[in-house]
Image (spheres, rainbow, N blue to C red):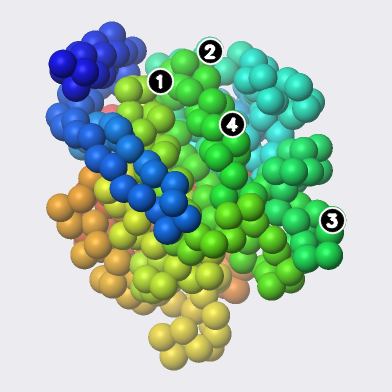
Amino acid sequence: MVFRDLFLLVVSAACCSAVLFFQWSETVQLYDELYVTSYVLSDGVTVSSKITATRKDAPLFVKGLYLTAYSAASSKKRAEIISLIDKTELNAVVIDIKDYSGYVLYDSQVSIAKEFGLVDDRLGGVAALVQEFHDHNIYVIARQTVFQDPVLAEKKYEWAITRRGGGVWRDYKGLAWVDPTRKEIWEYNAAIAKEVSTFGFDEINFDYVRYPSDGPIQQAVYSHSEREKTENMGMFFSYLNTQLAVIPVYISLDFFGFVMERHDGISIGQRLEDAVGEVDYISPMMYPSHYPSGHLGFSNPAAHPYAVLDNGMKKGAPYFVDTRARVRPWIQAFNIGAQYGAANIRAQIDAIEQYPNAGWLLWNAANRYSTAGLTLVTE
């Protein structure tokens, strides 16, 4: 009886929200599976009554670009980006709603954000902004950083990663991180995601879903250090799935590019196999300039974009077969290691599009984009 009532609640919520989802596309059924599971972590914590609502394929292959909150809030920049998307194969934008600083970039009513002064409203009227993109058939993704959250770590010491001997732990940039093993951090980010979903976003993209990768790692102290990093991150991905199951948005994760080739957690807790059943998209950051000298025998991998992307896709794509998630890499649209004009951008796209259902996202931190490397759309 309880299970039946739970099922009706999920279906009811999905039906009520479906009218708002993908207003500009064909009708999409959001949920086709529901089941309850239970498992016990090594530290004795039990995760039970987990709702898994499997979303069906999105109505398009996402081909997008990244925008800061400042860019998205600028009417001039929006017009420029919409014009670019209207005349090319692009069909999506990714907009910061909580960035690397930890600040929430809209007028959030989430209690923790308000209590600790974590709001920096750069976006203004978010729902109207999202609607403007939707009016041009543009899929809109909200980007939310999670565990690199220096402003919260500084203001709520007990939620920060600490260091042996006392004090807040910091990476080599001097940034504090919140503790990825603390449930309060998970709850806070889920609350933001739920609030953001009410603005009409089609998807929420979670970044910095990992342990720190640099700094005095051996000095870092976590609340639940008994958990393996991959175990803890897998638990977090399951938590996101559970919390957002009845909300009509797709969910995605940003991973390091090497997850496509390595499955040991790469010291930050990220493995494909822990996430492909929990989210709709995984976006490995496969920027050729970020691979080390000697990778694939290249002294400068940035000069060989097709080979780098092709190798990663060949090794990683099989992990997505018969799972919920699609692979949708971030690709390089900036000049580090080599000039990234039309040829190098297109080489990355060609390597990815050998695989069915694989989309891609352009990254340029300064939001400088052009038609270079993109297919133009005829009227």
Q: Which mark is residue 167?
A: 3
Marks 1 and 3, the one that precedes in the sequence: 1
Residue 112 horizontal side relative to residue 298, left or right: right
Using the numbered discs, state the Cα–Cα distance from disc 1 to disc 2 in whole angstroms. Answer: 10 Å
User: Which type of secondary structure does the marked residue at label 2 adopt?
Assistant: helix
Q: Residue at x 23, y 35 (%)?
A: 36
Q: Which mark is residue 187?
A: none
Quarter that holds the C terminus: top left
User: Which type of secondary structure does the marked residue at label 3 adopt?
Assistant: loop
Specify the amino acid type for callout 2: Ala
Marks 3 and 2, the one that precedes in the sequence: 2
Marks 4 and 1, the one that precedes in the sequence: 1
Residue designated by label 4: 188
Using the numbered discs, state the Cα–Cα distance from disc 4 to disc 3 in whole angstroms. Answer: 23 Å
Residue designated by label 2: 128
Q: Mark 4 vs mark 3: give the one in front.
A: 3
Quarter that holds the N terminus: top left
Using the numbered discs, state the Cα–Cα distance from disc 3 to disc 2 in whole angstroms. Answer: 43 Å
* Residue 72 visible in rendering: yes
Which is more toward the observer, 270 or 252? 270
Marks 2 and 4, the one that precedes in the sequence: 2
Residue 356 horizontal side relative to residue 65, left or right: left
